[in-house]
Image (tube, grey):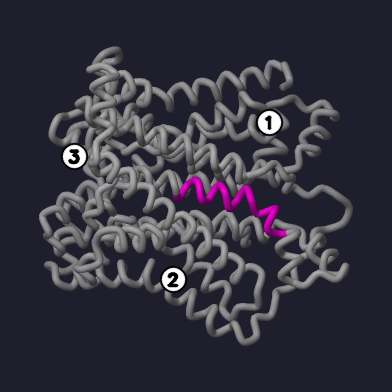
Amino acid sequence: MSGSSSTRGVVAAATLVAALTLLPVLIALPAALAEGPARAAEYLFRPRIGNLLANTGLLVAVTVPAAVVLGAAAAWLVERTALPGAAWWRTLLLAPLAVPSFVSAYAWVTVAPGLTGFAGSALVTTLAYYPFVFLPVAAQLRALDPADEDAARSLGLSPAAAVMRTVLPRLRPSLSGGALLVALHLLAEYGVLEMMRFPTFTTAIMQQYAVGFSDTSGSLLASVLVGLCLLALLLELLARGRRRVARLGSGTQSRPVPHALGAWTAPAMVLLAALVAGALVVPVASVGRWLAASEGWAGLLDTGLLGATLGTVGLATLGAVAATAAALPGAWLLNRHHSGLTVALERVTFVASSLPGIVVGLGLVTLAVTWAGPLYQTVTLTVLAYAILFVPRAMVSLRSGLAAAPPELSEAARSLGTGGTGTLVRVVLPLMAPSVMTGLVLVALAVSTELTATLLLAPTGTETLALAFWREASQLDYAAAAPYAAVMIALSVPLTLLLRRQILEEK
């Protein structure tokens, strides 16, 4: 790694971010061992913990491959085939990002009350999370130069073999990054699993904290969750590989010729229609039905809804800026100075994101009460929690953007006398602007639906749409919850459209 002052500054910034993200873990682990290793072992080696581990593992083992297959297949169909109406399908396949996962779960429970437990949880999480794979894979497919694929076919390989030999290996960063996001979200998911009545470590932790408020049992369960997160990070590191993705050479990159689907056109459209129906039509139609059964649109105009909307927009904006800024040093180091240290700094930022928001929130509450009283119940502490929880979303996006920005251009700028900061501002950031915008939007979408950390850390009287929806939905008041769900979806639509424009580089 270079020893320049600018590089040392970036290393210091990445180290500070990694240390901040570890704070909740450093509080949870000592609390877990407060009553001694023997008590911890006695608690963890019980049939109940085995059942939780089996449920969590089964959900991850089924949902992650399903989301990867569906997301990658959908991206391939809209980006590399002559699918009729590809632009419309692209928008519809991204649209589920505008629907909070717990709203989808609530809709599916009301449409099919018997669809609970593992089957319902796997269905809803797959439908809610496949866009995390679809997005980076679609963007990568548009950025890939088809020259290698064309050369492989000219040497006698079949179309399928050419794709397997030249395209699929270069999609590994996008596929592994998307799969990692899905896995981490599953480990930390609470709303969907609670509604589907499928117990996992996260729901058990919430129950422990609800009963004992940060007791030893909850911390022990959180420690197991941290171990599962570390396993997911290791597997993603092995799957990602280090193959170069950026292209630098003479000539202009050509556009790939779409593959003709022929007889597969109808089955492909049926597959995409089923995906859109489950992920988008069911929840949106259910919210519309709840609205129709409520007091009407007058409920959308009350002051409580307006306050919740403003609170959501403000916190989402601050959280998105904080998480994206925090992710930039680690992503840059990983791409430009790949080493054991940079990998460790990047991996550390993923650990806390696997924890339920309540664990991160309680850790920050403990820190504020013990050492920084003025920060307790402030927007600053709330935004810090968002940055800790959602920095991986920005990290994955920035990492993909840097991977597509040839380092040779930065070296050329430096050889012409541009300093490190100037190179970053004039060369690197413009090239990775779409990925920066993607990171901002992904984090804003996550913050706008966050529940537990907001409840613990936000200043007294703060109201968000997610908190209001969960409060009403928990009382089975469909009509009262509907306006909050409708506004959450409405707010997310322009963000999703912006995400589509930036990811796919449409003008």
Q: From where the camera sits, is residue 472 visible?
A: yes
Query: Split into 4 quadrants, where in the image is the N terminus?
Result: top right
Is disc 3 surrounded by few (<14), some (14 to 19) or many (20+) residues within 10 Å? few
Q: Is 69 left, or right, of 372 in this rendering?
A: right
Residue 422: name its quadrant. top right
Res. 367 in view: no
Q: CA distance from mark 1 to mark 2?
A: 38 Å
Please state the extent of the stretch shown in magenta in the rendering: 167-182
* Position in image of residue 138 (x %, y %): 60, 60
Neighbourhood count class around disc 1 (C-alpha, 10 Å): few under 14, some 14–19, many 20 upward: some
Determine the main secondary structure of the stretch shown in magenta: helix
Q: Which residue is mark 3?
A: 207
Crowdedness near tag 2: few (<14), some (14–19) or many (≥20) residues, C-alpha within 10 Å = many
- Whether the magenta-drawn stretch holds residue 173 is answered as yes
Secondary structure at badge 1 equals loop
SS for tag 3? helix
Disc number lying in front (3 or 1)? 3
The answer to whether the residues at label 3 and label 1 have Cβ atoms under 8 Å apart is no
Residue extending furthest toward the top = 371
Pick the front one: 160 or 361? 160
Residue kind at label 2, given as amino acid type: Leu
Distance, label 3 to label 2, CA atoms, is 33 Å
Q: Reading the chain from its start, which is encountered first: label 3 or label 1?
A: 3
| Between 244 and 218, the one nearer to me in the picture | 218
Secondary structure state at the residue bearing disc 2? helix
Q: Quadrant of the C terminus?
A: bottom right
